[in-house]
Image (tube, rainbow, N blue to C red):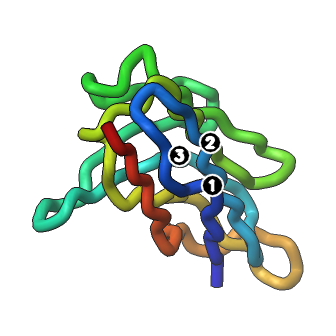
């Protein structure tokens, strides 16, 4: 199994910053896309930021210029730097990773998509 462990959520005042991290572990042959989603109470999960294996990024319009997604391929980790946070950014944030598992002999196995456990971000005005 591939597990994702998130960290870095918390409570800040408007205008503050937080950095979320998400580390993937397990039998991983390769990781393709990585992304961050958020979920508001009573709403469906929505994409916040996405980064491909080649480093191409895209962002939800409301976070452009404030949030930055980055990845460290050596550590199988994706980050979300969130600056100038607003109360409307308050949500549970989830990381998502798509990749390919590894067989015990190191050969590539089946593809996978995994989700982190979610981390609460609360921004007060």
Q: Are marks 2 and 3 in contact (CB under 8 Å)?
A: no
Q: Are marks 3 and 1 in contact (CB under 8 Å)?
A: no
In which quadrant of the rendered view does residue 76 lie? bottom right
Q: Are marks 1 and 2 in contact (CB under 8 Å)?
A: yes
Residue drawn 67% across and 72% down?
A: 101
- Viewport quadrant of the N terminus: bottom right
**Badge 1: residue crowd in 10 Å (few <14, some 14–19, many ≥20):** some
Looking at the image, which residue sits at the far top?
65
Report the residue marked by disc 2: 19
Sequence order check, earlier mark of 3 and 1: 1
Sequence order check, earlier mark of 1 and 2: 1
Residue 119 spot, x, y in % from top left: 49, 64
In which quadrant of the rendered view does residue 63 lie? top left
Report the residue marked by disc 3: 33
Sequence order check, earlier mark of 2 and 3: 2
User: In the picture shown, does residue 14 fall above or below 27?
Assistant: above
Residue drawn 49% across and 52% down?
A: 11
Q: Nearer the viewer, residue 43 or 35?
A: 43
Left or right: 45, with 55 as reference point: left
**Badge 3: residue crowd in 10 Å (few <14, some 14–19, many ≥20):** some
Q: For the residue labelled by badge 1, is the local secondary structure a helix, a strand or a loop?
A: loop
Q: For the residue labelled by badge 2, is the local secondary structure a helix, a strand or a loop?
A: strand
Q: How far, Cα to Cα, is label 2 from label 3? A: 19 Å
Residue drawn 63% across and 29% down?
A: 54
Left or right: 103, with 82 as reference point: right
Residue 104 spot, x, y in % from top left: 84, 84
Report the residue marked by disc 1: 8
Q: Could you tell me how many numbered marks the image carries?
A: 3
Residue 123 spot, x, y in % from top left: 38, 44
- Viewport quadrant of the C terminus: top left
């Amino acid at each position: 199994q591939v597990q994702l462990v998130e960290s870095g959520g918390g409570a800040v005042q408007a205008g503050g910053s937080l950095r979320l991290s998400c580390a993937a572990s397990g039998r991983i042959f390769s990781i393709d896309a990585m992304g961050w989603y958020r979920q508001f109470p009573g709403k469906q999960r929505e994409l916040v930021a996405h980064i491909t294996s080649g480093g191409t990024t895209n962002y939800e319009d409301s976070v452009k210029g404030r949030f930055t997604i980055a990845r460290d391929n050596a550590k199988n980790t994706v980050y979300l730097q969130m600056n100038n946070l607003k109360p409307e950014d308050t949500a549970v944030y989830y990381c998502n990773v798509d990749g390919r598992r590894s067989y015990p002999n190191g050969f590539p196995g089946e593809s996978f998509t995994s989700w982190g456990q979610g981390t609460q971000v609360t921004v007060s005005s």
